[in-house]
Amino acid sequence: LVYISYFVVTESGKIQQQAYNTIHQDVSTAAAFVDAEINSLDTVMQNIAYSNLVKKQFSTYLNQPISSEKGNYSGMQNSKILTNLLTAIMGPNRPVDQIYLYSLDYGAFGNGLDNSSSDESVQNFYWYEDLMNSEGNRIIFCDDDKRLDKYYSYKDGSRFLTLCSVYQSTFYKPEGIIEVKRSISPLIEKLKVLESKNYEAQIYIFDAEGIPVYATSDSDNISHYFSIASDALNTLPLDEIAKISEKDTKIFFSKSAYNFCYFFFHFCIPFQI
């Protein structure tokens, strides 16, 4: 009887440890998925920000008078050149879905799904103040963009990971803003596959404000999970995975390794065991 009890306890412990190891690996994999998506945004943004040719052409486009027939023709040519430059930066694999360039006052130029231009002021966007007050003038967030609804037919809507950054002139003065967007649908599909490997596991991804980027359900527990993890996340080293037990739920969480963007995705995976 003692041997049988010892065997059952020992084997149960092994099974539990195997389950924990699997969840640890899943959290790391989910973090890698997110980092890869952000890296795609950042690469394109950097290529634009360090392209003096793009910045010069955008400035020419903004300053081109269009009150005459000659001006209209020149404006069309400038628009075509700028479109070609941004399309070349995107490349054939199109790692992002949309690029917007903004002047610091009035004027916007789109390339990707939306190739329109406008005289709209970037200061009217809800994220403008957050961007200008952020460290390094860079922010990453996830949002719905109604401008892209008509170009995008994904069943969950036009929801995008977005990177916004202020770019500088050759004299290191703020000159404009870059907004780069990538649909979140490829990330969602990857997470769903990862989640399907264990029917008892649920994945929640939060932004730095505790807003869910991805959630298995609309459970009231979502905000509760974030509040539990947020205190521990303040002192949790990058790339490490922590675990908190609450009743019969094990919550595993980690920060995104993409810390130089000054933005962290929080992972919370409750696991019944």
Image: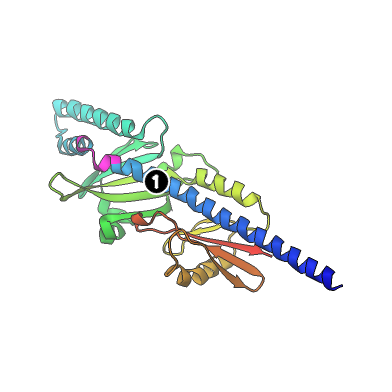
Q: Residue at x 21, y 30 (%)?
A: 78
Residue 39 percent location from the top left of the image:
39, 46
**Residue 29 in sight in this render:** yes
Residue 255 percent location from the top left of the image:
45, 60
Residue closer to the observer: 119 or 82: 82
Q: What residue is pinned by disc 1?
A: 39
**Residue 215 in sight in this render:** no
Secondary structure of the residue carrying tag 1 is helix
Q: Residue at x 42, y 49 (%)?
A: 161
Q: Eyeballing the image, is 241 above or below 80?
A: below
Q: Name which quarter of the figure residue 72 lies in.
A: top left
The three-letter amino acid code for the residue at tag 1 is Asn
Residue 154 percent location from the top left of the image:
52, 41
Side (left or right) of 71 relative to 140:
left
Q: Eyeballing the image, is 206 above or below 109?
A: below
Q: Name which quarter of the figure residue 259 lies in.
A: bottom left
Magenta span of residues: 47-53
Residue closer to the observer: 90 or 12: 12
